[in-house]
Image (spheres, coloured by chain):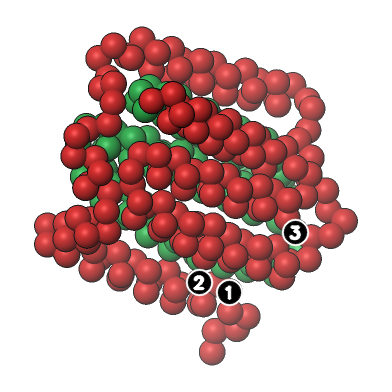
Amino acid sequence: MSSLSNYLIVSAILFMIGAAGVMFRKNVIVIFMCVELMLNAVNLTLIAFSQFMGDQQGQILVFFVMTVAAAEAAVGLAIVISVYRNKETIEIDKLNLLKG
Amino acid sequence: MAINNIIFWILAVGAIISALLMVTRKSAVPSALMLIVTFCFLAALYLTLNAQFLAVVQVAVYAGAIMVLVVFVIMLLNLRGEVYAITGNWKTAVGLLAVTGILAQMIAVFVMANDILPKGLHSKSTELGTVESIGTKLYTSYAFPFEMASIILIAAAVGAIVLAKKKLT
């Protein structure tokens, strides 16, 4: 069985790929998916620590993270739809309503 | 012993490659499909950690429900003709530098902490990830947060309908 640090390294790489996607992409939906990827990388860390340390609380926390991610997906995509209805675009550079 | 390691590295490399493909695709639909592949690899990684319940929930909730919602929204918005590539200016270079720097730091910490981290799975790990033990815990010690989660989901469903509605009358 692989050691704990291998799992941590894989989840760190996935997390930073997600963070890079959030920074570099222009499409709101893709940025949204990159946030989901970051959440999943953290879930992998939690499950790895939970199973290597023999403590179940990490897995309970992952369950709640998944619940909140599902709620976040529903609300976030509804916001994307209403933004598209008003601005006819979801390109992040053109959504500068709050820019001074 | 060795076969476990080989399976772990195949799954890890598959997850990382599909995540990279997801970030670098030009349009949204291939990105969404590669993200589904990443989620399936991650579910398999959960299985290597003996977390069966969360692996099934991962496929059902993430690869199933959430990604179907995302693909549906992409279809509704009809983004054909709009191409979003990664731009190659100096801001991208700075961001890439920051990302690789933070990543190198994290990996260095994990490699240095290798000696104090546990080497193998805990002896109880096979029973910790089952539906039975997680369900028992959720309905006893975590009953209140569990009910709160259902309220969050109801609020999210109502909020999504209100936000996406054309006219509130």
Counting from the top left corner in percent of width and height, residue B28 is at 72, 52
Residue A70, above or below B48: below
Image mark 1: chain: B
Classify mark 2: helix, strand or loop: helix
Furthest-bottom residue in this view:
B169
Q: CA distance from mark 2 to mark 3?
A: 19 Å
Classify mark 1: helix, strand or loop: helix
Q: Which residue is mark 2?
A: B160
Can residue A19 be seen here? The reply is: no
Quarter of the image containing the N terminus of chain A? top left
Q: On residue B164, which mark appears?
A: 1
Q: Residue at (22%, 60%) from the top-left corner?
A: B132
Task: Tell me what hue chain B is rendered in.
Answer: red
Q: Residue at (34%, 66%) from the top-left corner?
A: B152
* For the residues bearing labels 3 and 1, Cβ distance under 8 angstroms: no
Q: On residue B136, which mark appears?
A: none
Classify mark 3: helix, strand or loop: loop
Task: Tell me what hue chain A is rendered in.
Answer: green
Q: Residue at (70%, 21%) from the top-left corner?
A: B93
Q: Tell whether A95 sits left or right of A44.
A: right
Q: Tell whether A25 sits left or right of B110.
A: right
* For the residues bearing labels 1 and 2, Cβ distance under 8 angstroms: yes
Q: Please determine if labels 2 and 3 lie on a single subunit.
A: no
Label 1 packing within 10 angstroms: few (<14), some (14-19), many (20+): some
Q: Which residue is mark 3?
A: A89
| Type of amino acid at the residue the image marks with label 2 | Ala
